[in-house]
Image (cartoon, rainbow, N blue to C red):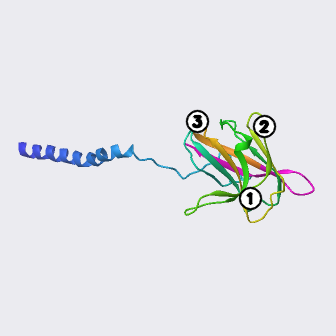
Amino acid sequence: MLNKQTKFVLNSKILKLLFFSPLLITIPFLNSINVKAGLEFQWNADSGFKRLKWFQTDNERRDRNSIFFFLRPSDRKAGLLKINMKIPKTFKVTLKEEKITLCRVFIGGFDARTKCLENIPADIKLNEDNTSLDIYPYSPIPSDKNSYAIVYKVFNPKRSGLYQFHSFGQAVGSVPVSTYLGSWTIVID
């Protein structure tokens, strides 16, 4: 009788060891995995929202960064006389007009870098509280097959998070009305 009880106790200890040992081995490795999520969400994702493409060279807090806000051919229905960009109030960086450019851009990918091909001469006006940017190109941006970009050369903000920029464009035509072009949501880690 005593022999059966000892076998049962030993078997239960072995079962517990076999059950919990994989968990104990994997727990230290869980903290060292750095997962980058490829998920973007929108606060107000209604039918009027249009997501625009963007690229940044560095997404770490307080690092030097070049942010490319793309205006691809599919984003422009007509030529643009003026581009207005709404900057989020929480995007606390030192923006300077001389560090913001408009250029014709090559959008890179797996085997090529994103780079400006040609700077587009334009007047750039930043309002006093850095919440709105107006760009007036000297000649209208055509609605051709080329992609254009607004490029910021800044130091990233101190706070990490998602920052949403909205863009409006004034099209070439008899009625100068600004229309919604789309929004960029950038990520700072």
Q: CA distance from mark 2 to mark 3?
A: 22 Å
Q: Is residue 11 left or right of residue 160?
A: left
Closer to the camera, 3 or 181? 181
Query: How dense is the environment of label 3, judged by Cα within 10 Å: few (below 14), some, or many (20 and up)?
Result: some
* Residue position marked by numbered label 3 in the rendering: 159
Q: Position of residue 112 (x, y in %)?
A: 58, 62
Q: Upstream in the sequence, badge 1 or badge 2?
A: 1
Q: Position of residue 55 (x, y in %)?
A: 62, 52
**Which residues are drawn in magenta?**
168-189
Q: Position of residue 16 (x, y in %)?
A: 23, 45
Closer to the camera, 56 or 16? 56
Q: Upstream in the sequence, badge 1 or badge 3?
A: 1
Say whether residue 171 is magenta: yes
Query: Tag 3's secondary structure?
Result: loop
Q: Identify residue type, mark 2.
A: Asn
Q: Is residue 98 left or right of residue 11?
A: right
Query: Tag 1's secondary structure?
Result: helix
Q: CA distance from mark 1 to mark 2?
A: 25 Å
* Residue position marked by numbered label 1 in the rendering: 75
Q: Upstream in the sequence, badge 2 or badge 3?
A: 2
Q: Identify residue type, mark 3.
A: Arg
**Residue 127, which numbered label?**
2
Q: Is residue 25 left or right of residue 64?
A: left
